Amino acid sequence: MKFHVPEMSCGHCVAAIEKAVKAADPSATIRTDLAAHATEIDSTVSTAALLQVLAEAGYPAIALGEGSED
């Protein structure tokens, strides 16, 4: 699942997002592109739940697609 995270602007933001996602799904794999304000999350948690996790962490996001496997 890919997300656009407009408020993600530094390494602290990336760490906070990773911590929040890992709290919801410890087995999640997270890849971030700070310059593009994007993150890709491989998780068993639903897109809606991940959007909620990101928002609660202070990083409202927009889902860009589901099931994208690279």
Image (cartoon, rainbow, N blue to C red):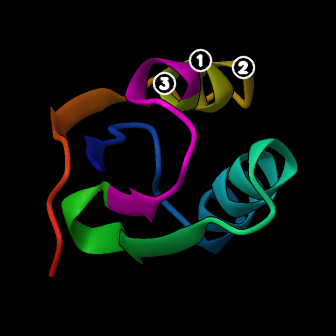
- Is disc 3 in contact with disc 1, using a CB cutoff of under 8 Å? yes
- Is disc 1 in contact with disc 2, using a CB cutoff of under 8 Å? yes
Lower sequence index among marks 2 and 3: 3
Q: In this view, does 1 lie to the left or right of 21?
A: left
- Residue 42 is one of the magenta-drawn residues: yes
Displayed quadrant of residue 4: top left
Closest to the observer: 20 or 45?
45
Q: Farthest residue toward the front?
A: 44
The residue to which callout 2 is attached is: 56
> Where is residue 35 drawn, in percent x and y?
25, 71
Against 30, is 45 above or below?
Answer: above
Residue depicted at x 65% and y 52%:
17
The residue to which callout 3 is attached is: 51
Which label is found at residue 12? Answer: none
Identify the amino acid type marked 3: Leu
> Where is residue 63 drawn, in percent x and y?
24, 31
Circle 2 packing at 10 Å, graded few (<14), some (14-19), many (20+), is few
Q: Which stretch is magenta?
A: 39-49
Against 66, is 22 above or below?
Answer: below
Q: In this view, does 33 lie to the left or right of 66?
A: right
How far separated are the C-alphas under marks 3 and 1?
A: 4 Å
> Where is residue 60 drawn, in percent x and y?
47, 23
Identify the amino acid type marked 2: Glu
Q: Is mark 1 on a helix, strand or loop?
A: helix
Identify the amino acid type marked 1: Gln
Displayed quadrant of residue 47: top left
Q: Is mark 2 on a helix, strand or loop?
A: helix
- Is disc 2 in contact with disc 3, using a CB cutoff of under 8 Å? no
Which label is found at residue 52? Answer: 1
